[in-house]
Amino acid sequence: MTLPPVNPKLYHIVHVDKLPSIVADGRLICDAVMANRDDAGTVIGMSGIKERRLRLPLGCHRDLHVGDCVPFYFCPRSVMLYLIYQANHPELTYTGGQGPIVHLEFDLHEVVHWANRSGLRWAFTLSNAGSYYFEDRNNLRDLRDIDWDAINARNWKDVKEGKQAEFLVEREVPWELVRRIGVLSNGTAQRTGQAIALAARQPVIEIKTDWYY
């Protein structure tokens, strides 16, 4: 079994037109809070799954629901991005493809340190946190329980569940922790630069075609 990386990275994907509101807030905010707001920007998730996540409790924090947390994947080129790329899932209302989608990259240890200091809970799952059955942990020693071969797999058909492991942070994560932004094209890189122009922190923007399908 592959051991976890020394410095694991976390990835949150959003439509590029969501970036101005994230920058204005100075943070990424969980769906439980965003559900009561009418911010400009394209929603790329499936509404049915988002609603279900609001009701799914975490095993290690029984009063905390998945939708109360900001979600991250442990890799770019996620299963969700593939569904966006295919643009034919019956529950996916967004059909604009992966071109305008950006990856926000974070350092796991920095996020955990910030959350602990801020008194916010965190956890990670071993599979899709939007499913009815998943295991979760809240001890970094248990990162070894994640299927890192699945996380790193390019062909994930047979390891789909492990590929969808998530890291969850209660309520919010500050923009200042974004370390890098990965995009598919020069056009999206330019849109991203314009969208974050007023941010106090300016993460590097890189064209990362290997993060896409």
Image: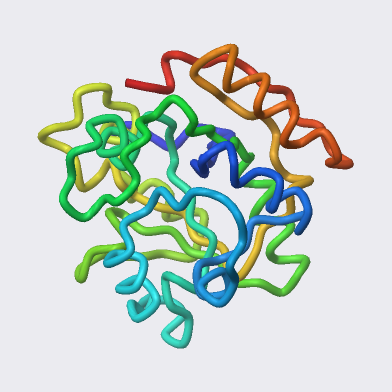
The residue lying at 20 percent from left, 23 percent from top is: 155
Between 200 and 73, the one nearer to me in the picture: 200
> Image point 31% across, 39% down: which residue?
95
Does 127 sit left or right of 200 as displayed?
Answer: left
**Quadrant of the rendering where the N terminus is positioned:** top left
Q: Relative to 14, say whether 102 is above or below.
A: above
Residue 145 at x, y percent in the picture: 33, 50
Residue lying at 63% horizontally and 29% vertically, measured from the top left: 181
- In this view, the residue in front, 24 or 132, is 24
Q: How many labels does the image show?
A: 0
Would you say 140 lies left or right of 52 here? right
The structure residue drawn at horizontal position 53% and vertical position 34%, both measured from the top left corner, is 103
Give percent across and percent down for residue 132.
Answer: 20, 71
Position of residue 208 measured from the top left corner of the image (x, y, whole percent) = 51, 16
Q: Eyeballing the image, is 78 above or below 66? A: above
Quadrant assignment, res 190? top right
- For the rendered model, the colour scheme is rainbow
